Image: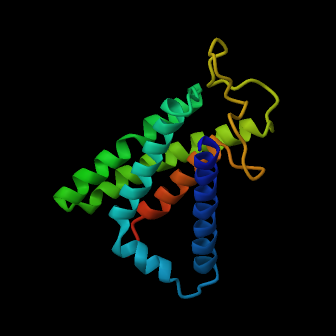
Amino acid sequence: MSELILKLFSLGTIFLLFIFVLFISLELFKIRNPLKSFIKANQMPLILITSIGATFGSLLLSFYFKLAPCDLCWYQRIFLFPIPVIVLIALIKKDLSARVYIFALSCVGLLIAGYHSILQVQIFKKDSVFCNTASVVDCATPDFVYYGFVTVPIISFCVFLVTLILSYPYEKK
């Protein structure tokens, strides 16, 4: 059962990457993008679903799978956990200006997740300056790898990337 859930997380990540590549390709080649109109119409609910799913997933990894988060994972969670709360408040108040805060949180979370992903593929041979050397969990060692590339930081990276795209203000000034 545990293996199945982790594979589903990994497949969800691959799906998010596919949607991202499709969205960017349609935008770059100026092809009619039906995803863009769907995203514009459903920005906040989509952000809410994505961020609640990611929050639930990170807690599931910690409490059900007993995977202790490293320091960089905690830093990513700091920027992920407020997003569902902000979205819920924005939906209740019908305030689309909350996208600015979600966008900013997603940018910082994306940078941390990107650094963590690069650290795990060992492009940097040094220890991370962000990881505590006395920590029990090593930031550079993946807890699991599925389909050859999907790790916890890659999942986090994809979530922040999708949240970043979803929170982008599409209307022209």
Tell me the residue at 65%/37% (across/down).
116
Quadrant placement of the C terminus: bottom left
Left or right position of 74 against 49: right
Res 82 quadrant in image:
top left
| Furthest residue in direction left, as rendered | 93
Residue at 60%, 56% (x, y): give it: 13
Q: Quadrant of the N terminus?
A: top right
> Residue sitting at 80 percent across and 36 percent down?
122
Q: Position of residue 113 (x, y in %)?
A: 60, 42
Of 116 and 138, which appears nearest the observer? 138
Seen from this angle, which residue lies furthest front? Answer: 1
Q: Is residue 173 visible?
A: no
Percent across and percent down for residue 135 are 62, 16
Residue 68 appears anywhere in the view: yes
Query: Is 70 placed above or below 28 here?
Result: above
Image position, residue 157 (x, y; %)? 59, 49
The residue at the point 20 percent across, 62 percent down is: 94
In the rendered image, the residue lying farthest to the bottom is: 32
Instruction: Name the one closer to the observer, 134 or 96.
Output: 134
